[in-house]
Every structure is written in C-alpha cells, then in structure tokens.
C-alpha cells in the first residue's frame, strides 16, 4: 500500500529492477538505484489483478483504462496532507438535550 498516493489504482513494474511499486517515490525509498525511464510500461491493475503493457510514446485518452476490466487507473493523485486547525470542545462531552424553555399552556 502506497503512503504517498492514497488512490492508487495500478502498480508499476520498475524496468530497472523488475520489482513492483505503487509510485516512483516508493521505488526511491526501497531501492538503492534511480528509476530507469522507459517508453513501455508494465502495469498491474489493483481491481482485476491482471497485468498489461502500455506504450507511453503514443498514450491516448482510452489508454487511461485497464483493458481487462475498464478500471480507470490514471487519476488525479490524492496525497496525504497535514491540516492545522483549532481544537475546540468535544461535542460528545455535552450531549444532553437542551431543556425546553417554552411555557406550558393550561
């Protein structure tokens, strides 16, 4: 599982070491060599678990989908981001209902 990209849809086989990675940053962390660039990429779809090749020199819009299951594996990457916020009171602490202040009519 990739910690750099949260919505990875396909693994990539590195042409230099023939190992599978979810992103180039994962390859850089786990390998002692740079990622070799190649025009032919080998992908492994995470939905159908099948492997396929794509020629990246003439990549078109229909190439964004797995040829076996039509899962779209080229997406805008969602990366984990830290957020800074103001910590307020926990709303679960005062979870009692408010007292009904309306007057009873006789």
Image (cartoon, rainbow, N blue to C red):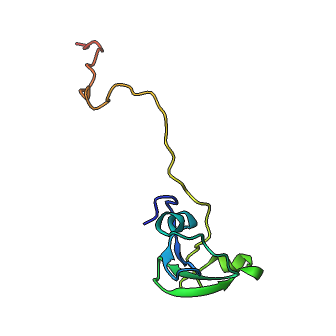
- The count of marks equals 0
Q: Looking at the picture, how far across and down is residue 104, in whole percent? A: 25, 14
The residue positioned 49% from the left and 63% from the top of the image is 29
Name the side, left or right, on which 4 lies relative to 87: right
> Can you say whether 102 is above or below 25 in the image?
above
Q: Which image quadrant is residue 76 in?
A: bottom right
Name the side, left or right, on which 24 lies relative to 96: right
> Can you say whether 40 is above or below 64 in the image?
below
Residue 63 seen in the figure: yes
Q: Nearer the viewer, residue 13 or 92?
A: 13
Q: Looking at the picture, how far across and down is residue 8, in whole percent? A: 52, 67
Q: Nearer the viewer, residue 39 or 5?
A: 39
> Can you say whether 12 is above or below 24 in the image?
below
Q: Nearer the viewer, residue 77 or 19?
A: 19
Q: Nearer the viewer, residue 104 or 82?
A: 82
Residue 68 seen in the figure: no
Name the side, left or right, on which 36 lies relative to 86: right
Q: Looking at the picture, how far across and down is residue 33, in whole percent? A: 56, 71
Q: Looking at the picture, how far across and down is residue 61, in whole percent? A: 72, 75
Quarter of the picture holding the N terminus:
bottom left
Quarter of the picture holding the C terminus:
top left
| Residue closest to the far front | 32
The residue positioned 61% from the left and 65% from the top of the image is 75
């Amino acid at each position: 599982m990739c910690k750099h990209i949260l919505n990875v849809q396909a693994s990539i086989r590195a042409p230099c070491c023939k190992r599978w990675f979810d992103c180039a940053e994962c390859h850089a962390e786990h390998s002692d060599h740079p990622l070799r660039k190649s025009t032919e990429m080998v992908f492994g779809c995470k939905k159908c678990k099948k492997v396929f090749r794509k020629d990246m020199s003439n990549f078109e819009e229909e190439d964004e989908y797995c040829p076996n299951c039509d899962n779209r594996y080229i997406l805008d990457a969602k990366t984990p981001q830290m957020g800074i916020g103001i910590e307020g009171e926990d709303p679960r602490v005062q979870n009692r209902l408010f007292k009904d202040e309306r007057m009873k009519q006789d």
